[in-house]
């Protein structure tokens, strides 16, 4: 089960994040790619967009390309089902954009020039993806960014580009290939932004519309006579399926639906048993006993058995909180404390508080790098003697640290700056160097030596900022996970249930006494299923079926499942039987409204007295002075009645309207007073018009524009055949 690997993924104090690049870069290898082209009787496509077939091969290839780029940026990222779903959607939308907008881009001349790309990659305000790339470059070329100004060092950038192949070879990196991927992504993104900008700038608000928006705060006092539809008997107004179908066609935009499936699912959860719990507790208790027995020489035991291993680090409260752990225990217990066993999620833990100190969060340092040769004792001794002599020169005042660095340091990236490395945070430097400047008790102005795999460093601490309380600790962890025997019990139950209930009738009867999720609605590209969790295979299976009442089994990390497909809902308008209850009410009220409008108009012939009109119509009532606002459809006593509001502001004051059929009632209105303008909206209409244009333009981005285009296009998405 995948749950077993989660403790490794978390590593308890996981430092790092998925940057903005993930939103564009994120990708996933095709699920079961070996069988990608084997199904569908030769129909190896994942959809059609405006008549153009999108082959599974093309889709898979683009996923692979994105995957390669993602692995370059974040090689340790583990893809889960949610990320896989995002990946597939991103790749699909990219292909769709190429098909629907590619010709428009060309005809509009939308492109990214070489100079523009250079500015986006290497300018003073790089594209977010370029920023991510530059942070990777900084790992091998720290001086590419000026530590004092935070600006890019253009000379170092040119040097990096010139030597990129050499750098890749020496550092076993792939910056050349990574740069190509990122430039392509930036180019695609910029073209989309240019297209969105052109569309947004074409937005225009007519003056009359601006006036309507400005005056939406107007109010009125109105008298009206109304007759509720409930006053007429339902059985007099029958609604046929033909009428429902006709109504659906007339209101296609409102009722058209995406393809979906409805399933019933019986689950057999894989929870740790009492025996599993006892075994986990016994294991963690034994581990604690062994640790106690290793005291006081516990370093070897920590290195072998702790979650952190031999590399124990210091962490602040903020670091701990990022892992969603409670930092109070770790920071309140005295150094040397060994906790009792406690729980964190599905893990049993005990912790040793190793050390605690106050250390800066950020420092500025300079260094002089000397060679240790092949690292023999004699060579180390000679290097230290050289370092000591250089330190004496600095301390004597004969030369300052910077002069000595220029003359002696092997670090070409910093020697010309007097060895200055600028400001950096905890964890950015190699461990021995990091520990010396942050935890070695150095004060600004102090000089020290330290050996690292790069050589012998003479370090000058220049500045230290933001001191924080830090704790070093070691966690010992045992996961409370279901055993193979526990999993087998759940599996056997699922198998037995399926074997005994192979028809829809048998399933429905037996499911009543099981852990049943009923009427679960699935959409084509769903990954997380309500009430179920991660269940992409269930979704894929459901959409591969043409008829209901099929039964199959599935599993995820936490349960075995037996599912019955209850309903197949195709894309398009629903069947009359599926919306009969909802639409019968609407259509019935339309019929009632027509009759009541006729009755009210007949009663109003020759009179404008609302009371007299109401007296002639059964169940009619009069409201004398209702307050109506143009900005709200709500009418006191009636609920939402937009037609009543519209009629009020469309009839002159003192006049009587014709009867109107509303949402819940038919009515005749007499406006008493109507505000000409909203009191809070004085001023020049053109000023408000410009403000509203800017507001609407700011809301138009590529995603919103593209979604509208997709809705208007003929898109057939059949990715579920393969993914």
Image: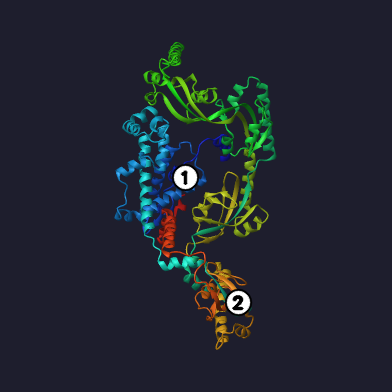
Q: Using a 10 Å C-alpha cutoff, classify the residue at mark 1 as few (fewer than 14 neighbours), some (14 to 19) or many (20 or more).
A: few
Is residue 108 left or right of 387 when viewed as pictured? Answer: left
Which structural element holds mark 2? helix
Indicate the position of residue 107 as horizontal and vertical percent values: 29, 55
Give the Cα separation between the discs numbered 2 and 1: 58 Å
Give the mark nearest the N terminus, 2 or 1. Answer: 1
Indicate the position of residue 286 as horizontal and vertical percent values: 68, 28
Dots 2, 1 in contact, CB < 8 A:
no
Is residue 402 left or right of 576 when viewed as pictured? Answer: left
Residue 32 numbered tag = 1
Residue at the location (39% across, 30% down)? 143
Residue 229 numbered tag = 2
Q: Extreme bottom residue here?
A: 606
Residue 718 numbered tag = none
The residue nearer to you, when weighing 622 against 38, is 622
Q: Quadrant of the N terminus?
A: top right
Indicate the position of residue 354 as horizontal and vertical percent values: 62, 26
Is 602 placed above or below 215 here? below
Determine which quarter of the picture holds residue 144: top left
Question: Would you say residue 715 is visible in this rendering?
Answer: no
The residue nearer to you, when weighing 299 against 525, is 299
């Amino acid at each position: 089960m995948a749950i077993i690997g989660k403790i490794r993924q978390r590593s308890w104090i996981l430092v790092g994040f998925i940057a903005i690049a993930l939103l564009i870069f994120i990708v996933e290898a095709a699920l079961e790619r070996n069988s990608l082209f084997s199904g569908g009787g030769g129909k190896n496509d994942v959809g059609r967009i405006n008549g153009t077939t999108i082959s599974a091969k093309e889709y898979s290839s683009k996923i692979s390309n994105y995957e390669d780029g993602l692995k370059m940026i974040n090689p340790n990222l583990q893809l889960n089902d949610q990320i896989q779903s995002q990946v597939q959607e991103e790749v699909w939308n990219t292909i769709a954009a190429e098909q629907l907008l590619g010709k428009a881009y060309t005809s509009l001349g939308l492109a990214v020039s070489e100079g523009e790309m250079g500015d986006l990659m290497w300018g003073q305000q790089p594209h977010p993806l370029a920023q991510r790339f530059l942070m990777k470059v900084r790992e091998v070329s720290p001086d590419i960014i000026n530590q004092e100004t935070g600006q890019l060092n253009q000379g170092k950038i040119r040097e990096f580009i010139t030597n990129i192949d050499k750098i890749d070879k020496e550092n076993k990196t792939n910056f050349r290939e990574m740069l190509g991927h990122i430039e392509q992504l930036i180019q695609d993104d910029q073209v989309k932004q240019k297209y969105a900008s052109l569309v947004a700038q074409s937005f225009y608000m007519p003056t009359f519309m601006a006036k309507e928006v400005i005056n939406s705060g107007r109010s009125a006092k109105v008298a009206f006579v109304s007759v509720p539809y409930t006053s007429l008997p339902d059985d007099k107004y029958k609604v046929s399926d033909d009428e429902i179908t006709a109504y659906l066609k007339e209101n296609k935009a409102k009722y058209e639906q995406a393809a979906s499936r409805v399933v019933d699912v019986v689950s057999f959860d894989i929870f740790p048993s009492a025996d599993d719990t006892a075994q986990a507790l016994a294991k963690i208790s034994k581990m604690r006993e062994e640790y106690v027995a290793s005291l006081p020489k516990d370093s070897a035991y920590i290195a072998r058995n702790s979650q952190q291993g031999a590399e124990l680090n210091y962490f602040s409260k903020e670091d701990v909180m990022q892992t969603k752990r409670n930092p109070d225990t770790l920071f309140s217990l005295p150094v040397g404390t060994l906790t009792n066993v406690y729980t964190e999620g599905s893990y049993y833990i005990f912790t040793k508080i190793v050390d605690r100190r106050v250390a800066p969060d950020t420092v500025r340092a300079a260094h002089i790098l000397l060679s240790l040769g092949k690292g023999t004792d004699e060579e180390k001794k000679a290097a230290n003697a050289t370092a000591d002599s250089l330190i004496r020169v600095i301390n004597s005042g004969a030369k300052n640290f910077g002069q000595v660095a220029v003359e002696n340091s092997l670090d070409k990236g910093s020697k010309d700056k007097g060895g200055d490395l600028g400001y950096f945070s905890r964890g950015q430097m190699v461990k021995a160097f990091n520990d010396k400047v942050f935890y070695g008790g150095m004060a600004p102005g102090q000089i020290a030596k330290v050996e690292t795999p790069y050589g012998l460093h003479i370090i000058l601490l220049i500045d230290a900022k933001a001191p924080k309380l830090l704790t070093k600790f070691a966690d010992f962890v045992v996961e409370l996970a279901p055993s193979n025997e526990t999993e087998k019990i759940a599996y056997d139950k699922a198998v037995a249930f399926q074997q005994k209930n192979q028809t829809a009738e048998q399933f429905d009867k037996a499911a009543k006494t099981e852990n049943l999720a009923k009427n679960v609605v699935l959409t084509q590209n769903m990954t997380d299923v309500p009430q179920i969790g991660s269940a992409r295979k269930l979704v894929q299976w459901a959409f591969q079926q043409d008829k209901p009442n099929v039964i199959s089994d599935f599993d995820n990390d936490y349960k075995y499942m037996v599912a019955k497909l209850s309903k197949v809902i195709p894309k398009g308008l629903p069947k009359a039987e599926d919306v009969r209850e909802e639409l019968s009410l609407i259509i019935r009220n339309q019929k009632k409204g027509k009759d009541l409008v006729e009755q009210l108009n007949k009663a109003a012939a020759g009179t404008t007295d609302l009371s007299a009109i109401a007296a002639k119509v059964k169940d009619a009532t009069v409201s004398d002075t209702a307050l109506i606002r143009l900005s709200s459809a709500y009418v006191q006593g009636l609920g939402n009645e937009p037609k009543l509001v519209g009629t009020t502001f469309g009839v002159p004051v003192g006049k009587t309207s014709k009867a109107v059929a509303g949402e819940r009632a038919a009515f005749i209105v007499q406006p008493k007073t109507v505000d000409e303008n909203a009191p809070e909206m004085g001023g020049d209409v053109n000023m408000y018009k410009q403000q509203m244009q800017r507001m609407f333009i700011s809301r138009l981005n590529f995603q919103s524009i593209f979604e509208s285009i997709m809705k208007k296009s003929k898109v057939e998405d059949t990715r579920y055949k393969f993914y």
